[in-house]
Image (tube, coloured by chain):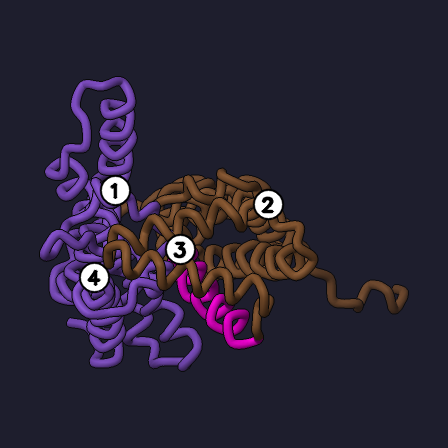
Chain colours: A purple, B brown
């Protein structure tokens, strides 16, 4: 089991990503239109690739929403479930490959603007990445707070699997 | 024996990540300032590419497998270096009236406002842009822009650093010790 501080890092990061999703919904529903530029540096925000609420597109695209959602779920999930680094690395590489294929299939014209593929791949990408970000953030936390060796040894066992 | 024999020596070269960070940050910087290329950046692609390059160079040069924590630090610093430099240069170019991508960006903002809030919102944004063009970029806009840039470059660096550390493993696999008889 994680130490309490290790858990709180996961919950806090999950909260941040859920907050970003909520903020994009807020911009679409009640926020001033000029706030739409908040996400412009990280997302193309093309309206036809975004979910709509009352015909107003959200401030981030479908893939970004699901990546954030995957990151939010993953940071909480991997506090309690530790599937092993090697297995998750394989999943991550597979998902990155699928993402390239998804983009390539759209470019070739096999299908166009398919929300399902982008949602599932985005979610899996966020989920698998969150395992490593949680691991890294916990490691940094233990390093900077000079936590006890018990916490550190748990982390290294967890990493080596 | 001379005194030199007693001097402490470091038998192994200490890995220096600054060069890798600089090259990765350079890529983030270039991709962020080239007009039109910076608008193609979606889902943190620019930050991910820059951090991957930095981690690839660092692990390749020293034959290392880095921990996720080290990857995150390298990723975040790379993105902050490149992203902040790009932001500062963009601000300077805007101040001098040399930012060629600004007009395109403003057109996109009007289009986005039209999508988000209809013609009235678009008109509001148009008026706001005209007012800003007359007044120039204020300190408040610079600070808000810088904060947004720092937030998203940090998120990009966090994600890319963690992935990079998992993918770029250069150190030879450790041979498990033989079980005791």
Q: Where residue B79 sits in the image (x, y, percent)? A: 50, 56
Classify B46 as above or below B149.
Answer: above
- Alpha-carbon span between mark 4 and mark 3: 23 Å
Of badges 4 and 3, the one in the foreground is: 4
Give the residue number, with chain letter if any, for mark 2: B100
User: Which residue in the protein does label 3 denote?
Assistant: B156
- Which one is earlier in the sequence, the residue at label 1 or at label 4? 4
Quick one: SS at disc 3?
helix
Label 4 marks which chain's residue? Answer: A
Question: Numbered disc 3: what chain?
Answer: B
Depth-wise, is mark 2 or mark 1 nearer the camera?
2
Number of labels in the image equals 4
Question: Can you identify the residue that label 1 sits on?
Answer: A92
Q: Residue at x 57, y 41 (%)?
A: B34
In the rendered structure, the answer to whether residue B159 lies left or right of residue A73 reads right
Range drawn in magenta:
B139-157
- Above or below residue A149? Residue B133 is above
What is the quadrant of residue A147 in the picture? bottom left
Residue ID for mark 4: A28
């Amino acid at each position: 089991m994680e130490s309490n501080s290790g858990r709180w890092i996961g919950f806090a990061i999950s909260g941040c990503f859920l907050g970003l999703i909520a903020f994009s919904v807020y911009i679409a529903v009640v926020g001033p239109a000029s706030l739409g530029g908040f996400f412009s540096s990280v997302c193309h925000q093309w309206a036809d690739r975004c979910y709509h609420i009352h015909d107003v597109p959200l401030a981030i695209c479908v893939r970004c929403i699901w990546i954030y959602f995957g990151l939010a779920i993953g940071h909480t999930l991997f506090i309690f479930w530790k599937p092993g680094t090697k297995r998750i690395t394989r999943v991550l590489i597979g998902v990155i490959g699928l993402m390239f294929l998804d983009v390539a299939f759209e470019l070739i014209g096999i299908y166009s603007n398919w929300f399902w593929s982008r949602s599932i791949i985005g979610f899996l990408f966020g989920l698998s990445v969150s395992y490593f970000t949680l691991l890294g953030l916990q490691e940094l936390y233990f390093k900077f707070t000079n936590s006890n060796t018990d916490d550190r040894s748990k982390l290294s066992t967890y990493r080596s699997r | 024996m001379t005194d030199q024999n007693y001097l402490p020596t470091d038998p192994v070269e200490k890995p220096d990540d600054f060069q890798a960070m600089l090259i990765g940050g350079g890529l983030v910087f270039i991709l962020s300032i080239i007009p039109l290329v910076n608008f193609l950046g979606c889902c943190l692609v620019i930050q991910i590419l820059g951090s991957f390059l930095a981690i690839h160079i660092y692990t390749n040069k020293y034959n290392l497998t880095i921990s996720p924590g080290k990857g995150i630090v390298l990723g975040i610093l790379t993105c902050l270096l490149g992203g902040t430099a790009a932001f500062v240069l963009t601000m300077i170019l805007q101040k001098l009236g040399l930012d060629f991508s600004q007009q395109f960006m403003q057109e996109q903002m009007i289009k986005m406002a039209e999508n988000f809030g209809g013609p009235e919102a678009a008109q509001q944004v148009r008026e706001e842009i005209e007012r800003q063009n007359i007044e120039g970029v204020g300190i408040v806009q610079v600070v808000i822009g810088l904060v947004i840039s720092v937030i998203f470059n940090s998120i990009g660096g966090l994600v890319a650093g963690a992935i990079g550390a998992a993918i770029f493993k250069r150190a030879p696999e450790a041979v498990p010790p033989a079980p005791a008889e």
